[in-house]
Amino acid sequence: LNGVGFQLTDIKYFTSMGWKVVVIGQASVGKSTLIHYVMHNKYADSQQTTVQAALHQKKYLYDEKSIELHIWDTAGQERFKSITPQTFRDADVGFIVFDCSQPDSFKQTQYWYEKFTQHAKQGALIYLIANKIDLLWKVERNEVMEMVNMNGCAFFEISCVQGKGIDQLLIHIAKEYIQRNHTNNQIKTLNTGVIERKVEEKGCC
């Protein structure tokens, strides 16, 4: 990635085409806060507790290609183990989020991995996401990397408070989206109706 400059661009309108992204993890790890940052490019000081799966649509440009994500927020349901198979069904991407300052939240990530892979699309992308890196790490990093290597997950460290790592996460998804959909001729190039914001491309953690 080598620090190459690029434009990550938000688009104001949507189509029916897009990847289904399911955001899962234990309570209070910052799932809804992450989604809010992805949608609005800013940190939310407070979030209402989500009690059912909420759907958000995110569309942006990368390399002049249109990327569309349908993001499912499951926050609130995990307290009652009430996330249904329908939530995971046909998912293209899974965000498994844990709080790096709360070891118990990481201990449950294998459970969420198995839950997701049981119902998601075969070959779905899975991202293990360490949130709240602005706080003191209390999760053993070697255990994190063991899970990453064992399950073949992509791994990112983020802070919604500081805005770290989230652009790089969206870049990684965009590249996978373009690569996987290119052969199906599903990628569109869009040049109008956009709001641009420039960021610097960096490697994932």
Image (spheres, rainbow, N blue to C red):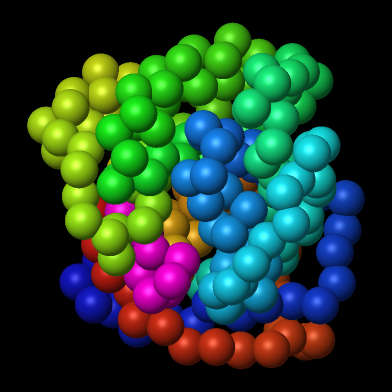
In the displayed structure image, the side of residue 174 where residue 73 appears, left or right: right
- Residue 9, x across and y down, in percent: 61, 79
Name the residue furthest left: 142
Which quarter of the figure is the C terminus placed in? Answer: bottom left
Q: Is residue 125 visible?
A: no
- Residue 48, x across and y down, in percent: 74, 57
User: Which residue occupies 47% across, 88% down?
Assistant: 198
Which quarter of the figure is the N terminus placed in? Answer: bottom left
Q: Is residue 195 above or below residue 90?
A: below
- Residue 133, x across and y down, in percent: 29, 59
In the displayed structure image, the side of residue 178 where residue 60 appears, left or right: right
Dividing the picture into quadrants, the one containing residue 129 is: top left
Q: Is residue 46 visible?
A: yes
Dividing the picture into quadrants, the one containing residue 87 is: top right
- Residue 187, x across and y down, in percent: 68, 57
Q: Is residue 172 above or below residue 101?
A: below
Q: Which residues are magenta?
A: 157-165
Task: Assign the magenta stretch its main secondary structure.
Answer: loop
Asked if residue 93 is among those painted magenta in the image, a careful observer would answer no
Asked if residue 159 is among those painted magenta in the image, a careful observer would answer yes
User: Which residue occupies 46% across, 16% down?
Assistant: 111
User: Which residue occupies 29% across, 65% down?
Assistant: 134
In the displayed structure image, the side of residue 143 where residue 182 appears, left or right: right
In the displayed structure image, the side of residue 46 where residue 16 appears, left or right: right
Q: Is residue 39 above or below residue 101?
A: below
Q: Is residue 161 above or below residue 25?
A: below
Dividing the picture into quadrants, the one containing residue 81 is: top right
User: Which residue occupies 43% across, 57% down?
Assistant: 169
